[in-house]
Amino acid sequence: MSALFYLAFQALKERKVRSVLTILGILIGPASIIGITSMVGGYRTYITDQLLKLGTNTIAVTPSGSFTITPADVQMLQGIPGVKGVFPYYVIPAYISVPGGTEQVEVLAVNAQEGLVEAVPGIQLSSGQYPQPYDTAGAVLGYLVANPRNQYYPHFQVGQVVNLQMYVDGSLESKSFMVTGVLKEFGQSFFINVDQDLFVPLATGQEVTGSQRYAGVLLVVYNSAYVNQVANQIYDLFGNEVSVYTAEEGINIASSIIGSLNALLVSAAAISLLVAFIGVTTTMFTSTIERTKEIGLLKALGFTSWDVVGMFVAESALMGLIGGISGLGTGVLVAYALSYLRPASSLGLEVAISPEFSLQTSLMAFGLSVLVGILAGMIPAYRASKLMPMEALRHERKRRKKS
């Protein structure tokens, strides 16, 4: 076996350019598979982490259609077994006047210390404190509201005043808030754009809107084991009048979409292995034609047909082996190169994705490369093994006369 691979290696050395080009064609397949799957794995982890920031014990409920959530509905939700707390909220679109235009923000009116911190455990203050439940003049700013990416936009610190224009029932209403706190950078999250929100007490939302029709409620259950049970009871109470969101549901949906995308991309990458198969087959057919005299001499010296098959299959398998190893290394480099191309989120934040490599996927990609090499060499090898010594030498003389 070692003698066969030694002969195969010598044969590849004699045809360096052709061998290198064939190996390059092989390595594209495993490199693409490793690069794609590792980045998709990184995105899956990133999205899962963002969704979990909502809290595994949290359920978000929003009204559907013309239905509205009232204090009476909040009381009904509070009565569901397993529910630890129910925190209604208002959502009010608003903007801050900035040089050359406006900066869009969103006012989320919810009792922060009681509900927001418990429902979204990833939220943390970088400075200041949350306003008291009945402090209708205090507000906590999301990181990008206080520290906008545009250097010409106003920046805010604790103790400063922020002037808002809020959309209420189709009209604009002006209101000023004292900044009592600024949140740490949070990133994108399921359901709430924390960095682009301005948080005020629930009483402020009631005062501004003059209504007790809530935009939604955040439920916190005692244990994540209660989440599905509570979600089902919410549907039993309200039917299709409400939409229910949980972190687990979001993760399942995201995983399903990412899994389908991963399968599609890997299938596309696997096509390059088919191209590599054709390339190796072509190379080996050319090699058998060029080495007709050599085959004839070997058979005349006593080499069997299986020896000839083994020699050529070993050559193609060696190309698959080298292509597979090179492809794995190239795939790792491609994955890290892609990780530096960080896309910006809708909030202007850079999304840092770290590739995640799978040993199982790496072994599969490597195995496919070797398998392509072996299978692609079999037909040319079989053809070469059928040459008879005299026929091979006669063919070589004819080829020389033509040349």
Image (cartoon, rainbow, N blue to C red):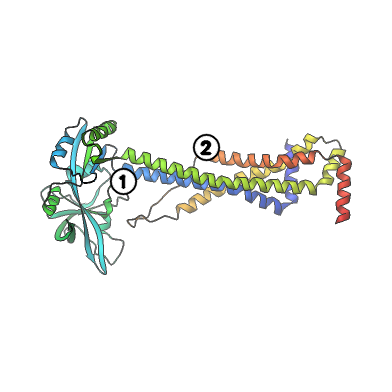
What secondary structure is marked by label 1? loop
Image quadrant in which you'd find residue 67: top left
Coordinates of residue 63 in the picture (x, y in percent): 22, 44
The answer to whether residue 328 is visible is no
For mark 1, what is the residue?
190
**Nearer-the-camera pick, 310 or 281:** 281
Along the viewing direction, whichever of 258 and 294 lies nearer the viewer: 258
Which kind of residue does numbered mark 1 sit on? Phe
Residue sitting at x 26%, y 67%: 101
Residue 221: x %, y % from top left = 23, 34
Residue extending farthest to the front is: 66
Give the residue drawn at x 72%, y 43%: 315
Local crowd size for mark 1, using a 10 Å CA cut-off: few (<14), some (14–19), many (≥20): many
Amino acid carrying label 2: it is Gln
Q: Which residue is mark 2?
A: 360
The label number, if any, that marks residue 331 in the structure image: none
